[in-house]
Image (cartoon, helix red, strand yellow):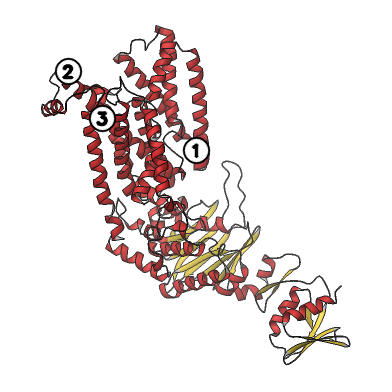
C-alpha cells in the first residue's frame, strides 16, 4: 500500500513540468514571430509597456495561455466526475446538454439581436463579444438548472443520462431553427464561436473567468471522498455514510457550472473532457479521485495548452479552430495510448 | 454477553409508488435479533428478502412501523451512525478497471477517515487483518475485475469486517458460487460469528444450504406472516413445509431435505445391510422408486462384490449403482 501511495508523486512532478513547459512555449510561440530575447525583456518588465511585442504578450498570449490552461483543467475535471457519476466511460461534460444549452443561448441572441438591430456581429466589437458570452452562459445555466431539478425527480442515473441526451437533441433542434432564421453575418459568428477558441476571454475578462473556473475546480475537491466510495456502487456508498442524492446533486452542479462557464467563454471545446480522464487513469493506474483529480487538472491543462499552440503555429495567419485541433490530435493519441496499454483492459490480469 | 442488535416493530416493507397506494409485501413484521448470531433469511424469489434487508439497513424507508439498530430507532440515526452499526455485502460488484482488492477493503474504513479519505496506520492494520481473516491476503494488488465471483465476495466481506460493525448483512451471498464455494462461505461467516462476535444476517433462496448452516431462520413469503426460529423448530412445526409449498415437492422433517414426491407407485424392497444404502435410495427416488418393506416385484440384496437385483424369478448381478439403476429402468419399456 505504501508504494501505491508514493508512486503518483514523480508522475505529478513530471506532469507539472510538462505543464510549465507548454505554458512557456505558449508565450514564446505564436503566429507572430517574436525573438525569444525580446519576450524575455518583455516578461521581465512585468507589465504592458505599450510596445508592440509587449502588447502581444500581455494582451494576447498570457490571457490566452491562462484561458487554455483553466479550460482544459476544468473540462477534464467535469469529464472525470461525469464518468464516475454515470458509471459510463463515454460520459463527458456535454452529455447533459449543458453545452448545447450554451449554443442555444448564442443562437437565440444572434437571432433576436439580428432582427432588432441589423447584424450584431458584423462589427465584432467588445460589447458584442460580452453579450455573446452572457447569452451562452445563460443558456447553459438554464439547462443546468433544469437538469439538476430533473435529477431529483428521476429514479436513477441512467434515466437522467437519457433525459440529458434528449435535452441536447431538443436544444440542437432549436439551434437549427434559430440558425435558419438568422442573418448570414450572424451565422458566421455562431460558426466561429462553435469552433472554440481560447482567445475570446482576453485580458479584461480574464479575472472573472479565472475566478469562476478556479472556484469550480476548488469545489470539486470536496467531492473526492464520496465519489471514491461511489466507485464500488451507490448502495455500498450509501451504507458507508454517503448521502448519495446530495453527492449526485452537487457533482452535477459543480461539473455543470464548470462546463457552462468554459463553454460560454471558449465555445464548445470537444474531446478534452472525454479523453483526459481516461489518459489519467492509464497513467496513474488508479480509480481514486484523490490522485485522478490533480492528474486530470495537469493533463487537461497541458493538453489544452498544446492544442492552443498547434492552433496558432507560426506562419499561420490567425487561429485554427481549437475544437478541430483537440479532436485531431487527441483522438489518435488516445487510440495509441489504449493500444500501448491494452493489457490493462484485460479482465484476467 | 448478548446484545440487542436489531428489533423491528410492526414493520411494513415494500416500495412506495409516489402518491399511489402502497401495499406491503408481507404482514407487519415483529422481530428481535440478539447477537452474536448466524441468521438466514429464506424465502422464495420475490418474497421480499432484499426489500427487508434494504429496509433494516436504512437504504429504503419502511412503509410503516419501526426499525431499531443497537437499541436506537433507525430513523434517528445519521448516515454516519448507520455506517458504524451495519455493513452490507451485495452481489453487485464494481467494474472500475483499476480498483484493487486492498482499495475495496480499505473503503470499509471510510466512515472513520478525515476529509480526504486517506487511511492512517491503524486503518491499514485493520485492512490487513480483515484480509487475513477472509483468506485473501494473497490477492493483494490484484484488480477487482480480474477476480472470480467467490474472490470478489470475500473481498467485500473483508470490507464489511474492516467497517467494524456489530451487524453484517449479506444479500444472496451464495447465489453465484459453486458448491464448494458456498460451503467455504458458510464456514467463513460462522468463523466471524464465533471468533469475532459478529452478527451475520444473510438472505438465500437456497434452502438446503440455509437449513444446514444457519442457527436461526427467518422465513418470508408473500402474504404470509413472518416466522423465525431454529431450522429444526420450524421444521418440526411444519412451517418450512408450508412456506415452500409446491405441488410434487415435499419436505422431509427428519433429514431437513426437500424431495420430489412420486408420481408413480413404483416400490422396491431393499435388504437392510446394503452398502451405500442411502445413496441407493437417493438414486431410486430420483428415478421414481420408493423403498418399501412389503413384498415387492423388485428387490435388491448384496452378495460381495455385486448388488443383486431380483426381479420376480430373475436375478441380475450389478457391480455398481449405475448398472443397478439401468437394469431397473430397462424393465420400464
Labels 3 and 1 in the same subunit: yes
In the rendered view, tell whether residue A72 sits above or below residue A284.
Answer: above
| Label 2 crowd bin: few (<14), some (14–19), many (20+), radius 10 Å | few
- Report the residue marked by disc 1: A161
* In this rendering, the label closer to the viewer, 1 or 2: 2
| Residue at mark 3 | A65
Circle nearer the N terminus (3, 2)? 2
Query: Does any portion of residue A237 appear in the rendered image?
Result: no
Per the image, the residue denoted by label 2 is: A52
Q: Residue at x 42, y 62 (%)?
A: B160
Q: In 3D space, how far apart are the residues under numbered discs 1 and 2 (Cα atoms)?
A: 50 Å
Residue neighbourhood size for the residue with mark 3, other residues' Cα within 10 Å, grouped as few (<14), some (14–19), many (≥20): many
Secondary structure beneath disc 1? helix
Dot 1 and dot 2 residues touching (CB under 8 Å): no
The subunit carrying tag 1 is A
How much space separates mark 3 and mark 1, taking CA atoms? 33 Å
Q: Which comes before the other along the chain, label 1 or label 2?
A: 2
Tag of residue A142: none
**In this view, A63 is above or below B166:** above
User: At numbered mark 3, what does the secondary structure look like: helix, strand or loop?
Assistant: helix
Amino acid at each position: 500500500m505504501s508504494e501505491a501511495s508514493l508512486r503518483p508523486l514523480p508522475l505529478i512532478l513530471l506532469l507539472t513540468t510538462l505543464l510549465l513547459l507548454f505554458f512557456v512555449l505558449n508565450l514564446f510561440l505564436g503566429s507572430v514571430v517574436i525573438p525569444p530575447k525580446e519576450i524575455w525583456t518583455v516578461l521581465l518588465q512585468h507589465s504592458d509597456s505599450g510596445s508592440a511585442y509587449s502588447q502581444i504578450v500581455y494582451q494576447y498570449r498570457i490571457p490566452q495561455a491562462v484561458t487554455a490552461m483553466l479550460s482544459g483543467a476544468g473540462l477534464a475535471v467535469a469529464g472525470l466526475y461525469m464518468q464516475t457519476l454515470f458509471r459510463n466511460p463515454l460520459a463527458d461534460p456535454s452529455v447533459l446538454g449543458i453545452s448545447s444549452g450554451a449554443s442555444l443561448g448564442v443562437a437565440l441572441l444572434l437571432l433576436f439581436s439580428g432582427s432588432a438591430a441589423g447584424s450584431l456581429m458584423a462589427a465584432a466589437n467588445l460589447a458584442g463579444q460580452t453579450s455573446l458570452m452572457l447569452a451562452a452562459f445563460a443558456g447553459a445555466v438554464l439547462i443546468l438548472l433544469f437538469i439538476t431539478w430533473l435529477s431529483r425527480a428521476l429514479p436513477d442515473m441512467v434515466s437522467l443520462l437519457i433525459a440529458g441526451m434528449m435535452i441536447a437533441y431538443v436544444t440542437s433542434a432549436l439551434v437549427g431553427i434559430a440558425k435558419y432564421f438568422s442573418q448570414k453575418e450572424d451565422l458566421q459568428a455562431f460558426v466561429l464561436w462553435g469552433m472554440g477558441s481560447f482567445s475570446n476571454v482576453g485580458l479584461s475578462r480574464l479575472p472573472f473567468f479565472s475566478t469562476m473556473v478556479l472556484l469550480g475546480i476548488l469545489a470539486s475537491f470536496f467531492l473526492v471522498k464520496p465519489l471514491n466510495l461511489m466507485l464500488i456502487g451507490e448502495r455500498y456508498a450509501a451504507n458507508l455514510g454517503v448521502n448519495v442524492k446530495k453527492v449526485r446533486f452537487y457533482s452535477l452542479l459543480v461539473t455543470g457550472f464548470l462546463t457552462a462557464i468554459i463553454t460560454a467563454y471558449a465555445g464548445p471545446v470537444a474531446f478534452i473532457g472525454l479523453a483526459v480522464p481516461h489518459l489519467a487513469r492509464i497513467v496513474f493506474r488508479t480509480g481514486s479521485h484523490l490522485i485522478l483529480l490533480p492528474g486530470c487538472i495537469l493533463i487537461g491543462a497541458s493538453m489544452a495548452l498544446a492544442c492552443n499552440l498547434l492552433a496558432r503555429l507560426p506562419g499561420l495567419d490567425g487561429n485554427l479552430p481549437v475544437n478541430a485541433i483537440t479532436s485531431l490530435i487527441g483522438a489518435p493519441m488516445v487510440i495509441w495510448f489504449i493500444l500501448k496499454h491494452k493489457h490493462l483492459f484485460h479482465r484476467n490480469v | 454477553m448478548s446484545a440487542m442488535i436489531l428489533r423491528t416493530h410492526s414493520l411494513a416493507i415494500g416500495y412506495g409508488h409516489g402518491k399511489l397506494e402502497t401495499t406491503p409485501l408481507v404482514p407487519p413484521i415483529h422481530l428481535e435479533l440478539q447477537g452474536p448470531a448466524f441468521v438466514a433469511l429464506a424465502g422464495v424469489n420475490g418474497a421480499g428478502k432484499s426489500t427487508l434487508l434494504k429496509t433494516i439497513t436504512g437504504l429504503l424507508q419502511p412503509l410503516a412501523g419501526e426499525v431499531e439498530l443497537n437499541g436506537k430507532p433507525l430513523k434517528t440515526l445519521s448516515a454516519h451512525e448507520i455506517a458504524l452499526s451495519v455493513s452490507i455485502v451485495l452481489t453487485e460488484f464494481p467494474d472500475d478497471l483499476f480498483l484493487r482488492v486492498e482499495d475495496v477493503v480499505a473503503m470499509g474504513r471510510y466512515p472513520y477517515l478525515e476529509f480526504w479519505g486517506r487511511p492512517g496506520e491503524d486503518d491499514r492494520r485493520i485492512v490487513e487483518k480483515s484480509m487475513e481473516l477472509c483468506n485473501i491476503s494473497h490477492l493483494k494488488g490484484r484488480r477487482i475485475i480480474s477476480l472470480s465471483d467467490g474472490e470478489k465476495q470475500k473481498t467485500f466481506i473483508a470490507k464489511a469486517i474492516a467497517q467494524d460493525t456489530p451487524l453484517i448483512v449479506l444479500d444472496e451471498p451464495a447465489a453465484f458460487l459453486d458448491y464448494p464455494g458456498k460451503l467455504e462461505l458458510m464456514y467463513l461467516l460462522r468463523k466471524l460469528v464465533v471468533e469475532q462476535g459478529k452478527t451475520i444476517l444473510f438472505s438465500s433462496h437456497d434452502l438446503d444450504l440455509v437449513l444446514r448452516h444457519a442457527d436461526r431462520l427467518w422465513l418470508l413469503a408473500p402474504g404470509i406472516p413472518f416466522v423465525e426460529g431454529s431450522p429444526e423448530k420450524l421444521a418440526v412445526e411444519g412451517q418450512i413445509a408450508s412456506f415452500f409449498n409446491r405441488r410434487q415437492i415435499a419436505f422431509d422433517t427428519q433429514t431437513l431435505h426437500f424431495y420430489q414426491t412420486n408420481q408413480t407407485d413404483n416400490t422396491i424392497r431393499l435388504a437392510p445391510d446394503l452398502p451405500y444404502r442411502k445413496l441407493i435410495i437417493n438414486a431410486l427416488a430420483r428415478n421414481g422408486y420408493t423403498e418399501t418393506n412389503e413384498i415387492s416385484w423388485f428387490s435388491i440384496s448384496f452378495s460381495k462384490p455385486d448388488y443383486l437385483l431380483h426381479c420376480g424369478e430373475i436375478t441380475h448381478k450389478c457391480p455398481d449403482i449405475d448398472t443397478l439403476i439401468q437394469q431397473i429402468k430397462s424393465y420400464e419399456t
